[in-house]
Image (tube, grey):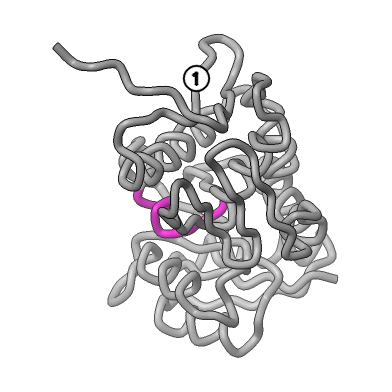
Amino acid sequence: MSRILVVDDDLAILELLKINLEMMGHEVITTPEGIKGFALVKQELPDLVLLDVMMPEVDGYTVAQRIRQNETTKDIPILMLTALGMLKDKVQGFNSGVDDYLVKPFELEELKVRVRALLRRSDSLPETLKRPQILVIGDITLLPENLSVKINDNEIKFTPIEFEILNCLAQNHGQTVASGTLLKEVWGYSQDDDVETIRVHIRHLRSKLEKAISDKIYIETIYGGGYKLIPEGVNKPVKK
């Protein structure tokens, strides 16, 4: 039985989620308050957090950031539930450290798929995240112990999801990895209409890499195919 914490100030949704998650066989803890939600995460150490965004006093983005910044809770999966479905909202959610993002209103069956996937993912992390094995390919050194990457003496920190995506690309370096494959390998499910999740994370990965190494590209988009990691990097085209 998994323990799931649901944080949402809409009491009707809170009750609906509690009933359906309990029917799935989970132990469910609920609270309508962001501040209390973070306190419960530290106290209960749930297997998964379902987190609303728009709440009084402390919003979901802030709660997610606090969960990720706390050494005890930083690896707990977070599924953000929100009516804010614009790309910029998703980017803000992923930047806050959430693992997956589901826009309200949603079908309960889709919620169940996402919950199962995150719980399965947290219970079956890639071997490189279970053991502190260092992977060196080209310019890139993956450091699983602290979820970071070294490129030419520049160390870059990533969220667990970002690191898993980079690790998946690294394990298949030089080959094109389809978006659906990334969804299946990292999240545990594959849905064609959810490729935007991959695009947002790839964009964020590139942004972090470019802040450290501004003159090279390490992740190539293969249009109509997916993404490919180039371990040695390629020089950015010079803008005229």
Most foreground residue, 92 or 164? 164
Taking the spot 57% from the left edge, 56% from the top edge, the residue there is: 79
Taking the spot 60% from the left edge, 90% from the top edge, the residue there is: 43
Q: In terms of secondary structure, where does tag 1 sit?
A: strand
Q: Position of residue 87 (x, y in %)?
A: 35, 36
User: Disc count in the image?
Assistant: 1
Q: What amino acid is at disc 1?
A: Thr
Q: Is residue 239 left or right of residue 237?
A: left
User: Quadrant of the rendered structure where residue 123 is?
Assistant: bottom right
Q: Is residue 76 magenta?
A: no
Q: Is residue 177 above or below residue 154?
A: above
Q: Is residue 90 visible?
A: no
* Quarter containing the C terminus: top left
Q: Position of residue 167 (x, y in %)?
A: 65, 44
Label 1, on which residue? 221
Spot the residue most to the bottom. Answer: 43
Specify start and end residues of the magenta stretch as a single range.
92-99
